[in-house]
Amino acid sequence: MNNPIRLSKRQNGGVHIIQGKSFVLLDRDEALKLIADMQNLISADSPPRAETMNKIDTRS
């Protein structure tokens, strides 16, 4: 089943990330850090913050 991620901008410059019934609200700084982490994850083997995010993800 295809369940796309939808993004929308919040008034304070943050981001609302929605996938199915789940959602995350990020303020502007958190959104920028997430973008940087994703770029590092794609371009490097294992940045420390991405490892932490993977550990959190596996517990859910």
Image (spheres, helix red, strand yellow):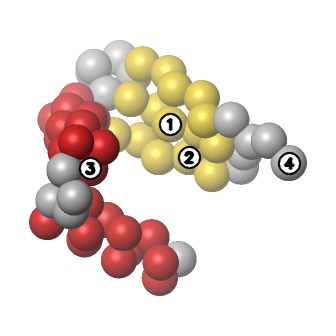
Q: Which percent across, then down, holds residue 52?
A: 25, 71
Residue name at image x 27 percent, y 21 percent: 12
Q: Earlier in the sequence, mark 2 or mark 3?
A: 2
Label 1 with label 2: CB-CB less than 8 Å:
yes
Q: Is residue 33 above or below residue 14?
A: below
Disc 3 designates what residue? 41
Q: Is residue 52 above or below residue 45?
A: below
Rate crowding at label 2 as few (under 14), some (14 to 19) or many (20 or more) other CA atoms within 10 Å: few
Disc 2 designates what residue? 23
Label 4 with label 2: CB-CB less than 8 Å:
no
Q: Earlier in the sequence, mark 1 or mark 3?
A: 1
Rate crowding at label 3 as few (under 14), some (14 to 19) or many (20 or more) other CA atoms within 10 Å: some
Identified by mark 3, the residue type is Leu
Disc 1 designates what residue? 17
Rate crowding at label 1 as few (under 14), some (14 to 19) or many (20 or more) other CA atoms within 10 Å: some
Identified by mark 4, the residue type is Met
Q: Earlier in the sequence, mark 4 or mark 2?
A: 4
Disc 4 designates what residue? 1
Q: How much space separates mark 4 and mark 2, taking CA atoms?
A: 18 Å
User: Within the image, what quadrant is residue 10 found in?
Assistant: top left
Q: From the viewer's perspective, is the residue at label 3 or at label 4 nearer?
A: 3
Q: Secondary structure at mark 4?
A: loop
Identified by mark 2, the residue type is Phe
Q: Earlier in the sequence, mark 1 or mark 4?
A: 4
Locate residue 48 relative to residue 18 in the image: left or right: left
